[in-house]
Image: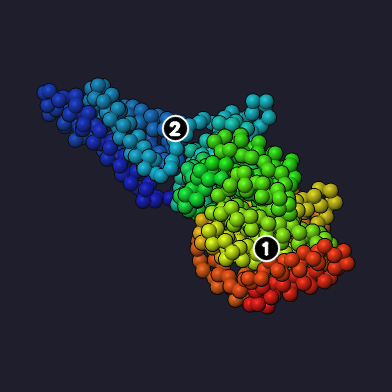
């Protein structure tokens, strides 16, 4: 069954129709005035105009409607679409000439030439004015491809979800590439279903996707909705999964500073598209003021969060980025990437451990960083349960070393990357990160010339050691996915989003705060696993089983983002400030006792017990 666009009269369409028919009459009168400018219009010509003006009006309505003048979304039309206007005006002029000839009311041919030029100018001008007054619109041009690709294979038949600017640009790009052919567009705005986008009809809303895909033998569905919320994206993807089509998405690419609006390359749906959130609005000027022309040190710079921090920091044009990491391979790859994309930023790899105070002293003495982002940490919960001493050495004493030396060398700002597992910790990793927070805030008192703050957030999608890479490996290698408990939930963010908000929070820091990023609603891990299985082309518990293996030591059913007694203030739509109190002046003494325990091979459970009592002692309100 062939589907056609629904024809409705909208205010914009009615305006264009009225404009065109009036222009068709006025253009004829103006053509007469121009041709007879010296002598005045003869009476017989005026009489012919009075007898035939309605012919030009009627022919314009009929011809322009048949050729699709009012089906196009002219705000997004590509250059080749304007050829319709030339053809329409030419045919309407010739048809009018023929009818008036049969009526013995024809004017001289020169008037019709002037008429054609004036009318074409009028109908093109109104559409260009509407197009050029649309913000951030780009005039793009391309032509339909052939029915087959260059190698003879048939074109991929595509349905585009989203009939706005992104959809229009996508249609142009698909035609330019010549491997896909846009067949239909979908948009929930019913008014758009009276139009075509660059010649592609808008045939229905999201609920019509399965039926249209079957009727038109669609091979691929591409989502082109850069402004849609993650909830909308998820709902539409769920509907698209009812079809047999490949599902892809085209993101908008935008620079933090330049705010560009070019569409990115078509790609497969990723789990981040389902769990991501609305675009973050950053105070780019405020970030620039704090970072531009500065020396920025990122510890753990080769890791998932550290490397993304470095990439985003580079966009704000610091003088130098210092990548401090114990693992040279990741750091080296990151440096090559930064040099390639941001040649105007100097980068240095500094190999070392945050446990090594002597090495840190060398780094700060030589480079004198202005801003420090401390991302170096052990974060794997089960591994840290088995290796508690190593967790304390890296997460607690490593933080103490970096923060203490940063204060000694009067770094302007020090920002600790923390975790939701630090709130009422039930595992070693969480306890060490809470101690790292307390250590950082204590330094704010010890070194008043340096601003110390911490940023706390939940799980980061696709970060090293996180659940997504594990699930992907299990799907590919084991044909199963393991989840600890059917009701376990976690907060999730993308690496890019977490890094952006960390940088933004550092601008707001005045000293002694813990910033909490708005993580949205927690997500069931079993739902995450099911989504990932579907995105891999399988059906959960049919092709790929989900197995529940029980909670691991120290694992919570659901994480918290702040303590009950922490005072919450809003700094940004996605950032909250937690005012902290009761950091101990005896912190260093307590850490000395902790160090004695981790150096004792027989400490065993005494280490974990001492950390918990230490957290309670240093911050009594946390009990």
User: Does residue 498 appear in the picture of this structure?
Assistant: no
Q: Is mark 2 on a helix, strand or loop?
A: helix
Mark 1 or mark 2, which has the lower sequence index? 2
Residue 254, how many percent across, how many down? 52, 44
Comparing 268 with 309, the one in front is: 309
Q: In this view, does 154 lie to the left or right of 24?
A: right
The disc placed on residue 357 is none
Q: What element carries label 1?
A: helix
Residue 532, how many percent across, how many down? 72, 53
The disc placed on residue 79 is 2
> Mark 1 or 2, which is nearer the eye?
1
The N terminus lies in quadrant: top right
Residue 296, how many percent across, how many down? 58, 47
The answer to which quarter of the image holds residue 380 is: bottom right
User: Does residue 408 appear in the picture of this structure?
Assistant: yes
The disc placed on residue 436 is 1
């Amino acid at each position: 069954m062939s589907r056609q666009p629904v024809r409705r009269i909208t205010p914009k369409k009615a305006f264009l129709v009225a404009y065109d028919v009036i222009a068709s009459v006025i253009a004829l009168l103006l053509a007469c005035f121009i041709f007879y400018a010296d002598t005045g219009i003869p009476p017989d010509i005026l009489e012919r105009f009075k007898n035939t003006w309605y012919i030009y009006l009627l022919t314009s309505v009929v011809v322009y409607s048949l050729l699709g003048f009012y089906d196009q979304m002219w705000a997004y039309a590509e250059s080749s679409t304007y050829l319709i206007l030339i053809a329409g005006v030419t045919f309407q002029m010739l048809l009018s000439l023929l009818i008036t000839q049969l009526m013995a009311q024809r004017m001289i041919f020169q008037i019709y030439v002037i008429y054609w030029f004036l009318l074409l100018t009028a109908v093109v001008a109104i559409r260009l004015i509407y197009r050029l007054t649309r913000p951030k619109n780009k005039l793009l041009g391309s032509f339909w491809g052939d029915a087959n690709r260059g190698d003879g294979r048939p074109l991929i038949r595509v349905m585009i979800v989203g009939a706005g600017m992104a959809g229009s640009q996508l249609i142009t790009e698909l035609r330019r590439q010549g491997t896909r052919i846009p067949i239909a567009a979908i948009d929930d705005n019913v008014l758009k279903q009276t139009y075509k986008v660059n010649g592609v009809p808008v045939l229905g809303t999201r609920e019509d996707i399965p039926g249209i895909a079957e009727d038109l033998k669609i091979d691929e569905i591409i989502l082109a909705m850069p402004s849609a919320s993650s909830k909308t994206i998820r709902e539409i993807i769920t509907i698209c999964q009812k079809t047999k089509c490949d599902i892809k998405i085209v993101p908008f690419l935008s620079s933090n500073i330049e705010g560009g609006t070019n569409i990115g390359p078509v790609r497969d749906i990723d789990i981040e598209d389902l769990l991501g959130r609305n675009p973050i609005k950053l105070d780019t000027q405020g970030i620039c003021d704090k970072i531009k022309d500065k020396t920025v040190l990122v510890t753990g710079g080769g890791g998932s969060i550290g490397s993304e921090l470095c990439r985003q920091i580079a966009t704000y044009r610091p003088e130098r980025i210092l990548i401090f990491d114990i693992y040279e391979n990741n750091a080296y790859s990151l440096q090559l990437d930064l040099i390639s994309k941001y040649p105007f930023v100097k980068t240095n790899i500094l190999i070392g451990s945050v446990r090594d105070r002597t090495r840190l002293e060398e780094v700060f003495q030589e480079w004198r960083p202005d801003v420090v982002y401390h991302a170096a940490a052990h974060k794997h919960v089960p591994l840290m349960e088995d290796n508690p001493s190593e967790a304390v050495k890296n997460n607690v004493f490593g933080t103490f070393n970096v923060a203490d030396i940063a204060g000694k060398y009067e770094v302007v700002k020090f920002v600790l990357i923390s975790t939701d597992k630090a709130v009422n910790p039930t595992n070693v990793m969480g306890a060490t990160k809470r101690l790292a927070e307390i250590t950082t805030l204590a330094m704010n008192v010890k070194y008043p010339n340096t601003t110390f703050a911490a940023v706390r957030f939940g799980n980061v999608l696709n970060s090293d050691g996180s659940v997504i890479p594990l699930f992907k490996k299990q799907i590919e290698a084991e044909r199963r996915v393991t989840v600890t408990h059917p009701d376990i939930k976690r907060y999730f963010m993308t690496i890019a989003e977490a890094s952006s908000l960390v940088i933004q929070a550092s601008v707001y820091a005045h000293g002694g705060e813990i910033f909490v990023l708005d993580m949205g609603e927690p997500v069931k891990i079993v739902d995450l696993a099911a989504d990932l299985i579907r995105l891999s082309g399988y059906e959960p518990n049919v092709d790929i089983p989900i197995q529940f293996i029980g909670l691991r030591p120290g694992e919570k059913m659901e994480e918290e983002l702040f303590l009950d007694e922490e005072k919450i203030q809003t700094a940004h739509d996605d950032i909250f400030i937690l005012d902290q109190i009761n950091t101990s002046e005896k912190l260093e003494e307590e850490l000395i006792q902790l160090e004695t325990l981790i150096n004792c091979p027989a400490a065993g459970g005494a280490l974990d017990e001492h950390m918990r009592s230490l957290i309670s002692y240093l911050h009594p309100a946390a009990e």
